Image (tube, rainbow, N blue to C red):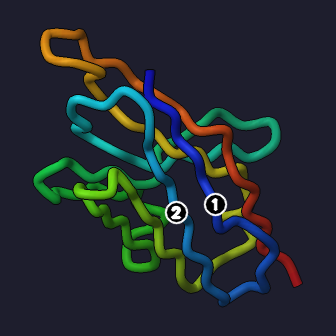
Amino acid sequence: QVQLVESGGGLVQPGGSLRLSCAASGSIFAIYTMGWYRQAPGKQRDVVATITNGGSTNYADSVKGRFTISRVNANNTVYLQMNSLKPEDTAVYYCNAYSRSYYGASPNYYWGQGTQVTVSS
């Protein structure tokens, strides 16, 4: 099993910045793709950004140019730097990891508990 713990959420004014962190721990043989997703009240959970263990990134169109995803493989940690935040970025942000627990195991998707980001004046 892999545990993911997010941190860094909070309340910020429009135009402000926040940095989210997510640390993976537990039984980890390899972590492939890591990512951030978000879910606003009454809406489905959508992808925000993903990053492979080789560093390739993908972003939702709504955050391109404002958000940056990065990771430190040695620490099994992924970050999301969020700049120029807008009220529509308000949501619970979830960390995700596609990981294999041991050699020969089937990889699985794991989720963190989520961290609230609120953008409001």
Specify the amino acid type for callout 1.
Ser
Q: Is disc 2 placed on a helix, strand or loop?
A: strand
Q: CA distance from mark 2 to mark 1?
A: 5 Å
Contact flag, marks 2 and 1 (Cβ < 8 Å): yes
Q: Quadrant of residue 104?
A: top left
Q: Quadrant of residue 12?
A: bottom right
Where's residue 57, x and y in %?
Answer: 23, 58
- Residue 88 lies left or right of residue 1; in this view the side is right
Between residue 48 and residue 21, name the one nearer to us. 21
83 in relation to 11, above or below = below
Where's residue 38, x and y in %?
Answer: 60, 47
- Residue 30 lies left or right of residue 78; in this view the side is left
Q: Is disc 1 placed on a helix, strand or loop?
A: strand
Where's residue 90, x and y in %?
Answer: 73, 61
Residue depicted at 27% across the width and 53% down the height: 51
Look at the image and tell me in which quarter the N terminus lies. top left
Q: Which residue is mark 2?
A: 21
Look at the image and tell me in which quarter the C terminus lies. bottom right
Residue depicted at 73% across the width and 85% down the height: 14
Between residue 20 and residue 101, name the one nearer to us. 101
Mark number displayed over residue 7: 1
Specify the amino acid type for callout 2.
Ser
- Residue 93 lies left or right of residue 77; in this view the side is right
Residue depicted at 51% across the width and 45% down the height: 95
Residue depicted at 52% across the width and 62% down the height: 21
Where's residue 68, x and y in %?
Answer: 38, 72
